Image (tube, helix red, strand yellow):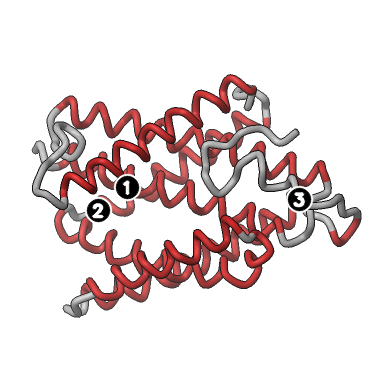
Amino acid sequence: MIGRSGNPTLNEKTFERTGRYLGSSGMTIEGTVNKSFIVLALLLGGAFVTWSRYFDGEDVSGYAIGGAVIGFVLALVVSFKPKTAPYLVPVYAVLEGVFLGALSATYEDLYHGITLQAALLTMGVFIALLLAYKTRIVKATENFKLGVFAATAGIALVYLISFILGLFGVTVPYLHDNSWIGIGISLVIVAVAALNLVLDFDFIEEGARRGAPKYMEWYGAFGLMVTLVWLYVEMLRLLAKIWSRD
């Protein structure tokens, strides 16, 4: 049985209605890795476009909002209809890149060098956890999965409450400020986002073992990208809090 994943796009029910596919028609780890490189390349391409426009003096807020809103809708469709992944995930990656490009440029304008630092830290965490998973230093046990799932759900709930309260001018204490408590909270969120990578690796490996259909390679790449984007954004937030104390 597929274990629980904290990533909402990769959960234990995803494979329940799919049959077993063998040979070239089935999901493989190599195929998922290849799709992941394609998706990340598209994301970086979209990010570069809005990044360049921002520093050329153009107002990219419309691109950022459009990318975020349309991307969110596409993410919901892919999450509930995995068969659409080969067609919608590339489009989603570009839109997510457009949004991230504007966000990253805004942070870079405030703190020169912060985006490169956040990107390198994100990549370092990814490689470290991949190696830890492959060598079985970190194991995706059921208790581990349940803990990460609960922590991820809790963070999502806090962010939702913060967003709703923000509409009424109310700010959740410490969540967004640069106090040591606020920095500590960001560190915890970064750690939870990073641990979701372990669950993503486990999900992809299990899907390949079970012979999931080929389109699930795109779905696996999609889920991995969602976690990496979340981790990168939280890295930006954490570094911004630290840099703003100087």
- Image quadrant of residue 219? bottom right
Within 10 Å of disc 1 (Cα), the crowding (few <14, some 14-19, many 20+) is: some
Q: Are marks 2 and 1 in contact (CB under 8 Å)?
A: yes
Distance, label 3 to label 1, CA atoms, is 42 Å
Left or right of 92: which side holds 156? left
Instruction: Between residue 95 and residue 171, name the one nearer to us.
Output: 171
Of callouts 3 and 2, which one flags the residue occurring earlier in the amino acid sequence? 3
Q: Earlier in the sequence, mark 3 or mark 1?
A: 3
Disc 2 to disc 1, C-alpha distance: 6 Å
Three-letter amino acid code at the position of disc 3: Arg
Query: Which quarter of the rendered picture does the C terminus lie within?
Result: top left
Where's residue 146, x and y in %? 55, 25
SS of the residue at dot 3?
loop
Identify the disc placed on residue 17: 3
For the point 67% across and 25% down, the residue is 136
Residue 125 % position (x, y): 47, 38
**Tag 1: residue type?**
Gln
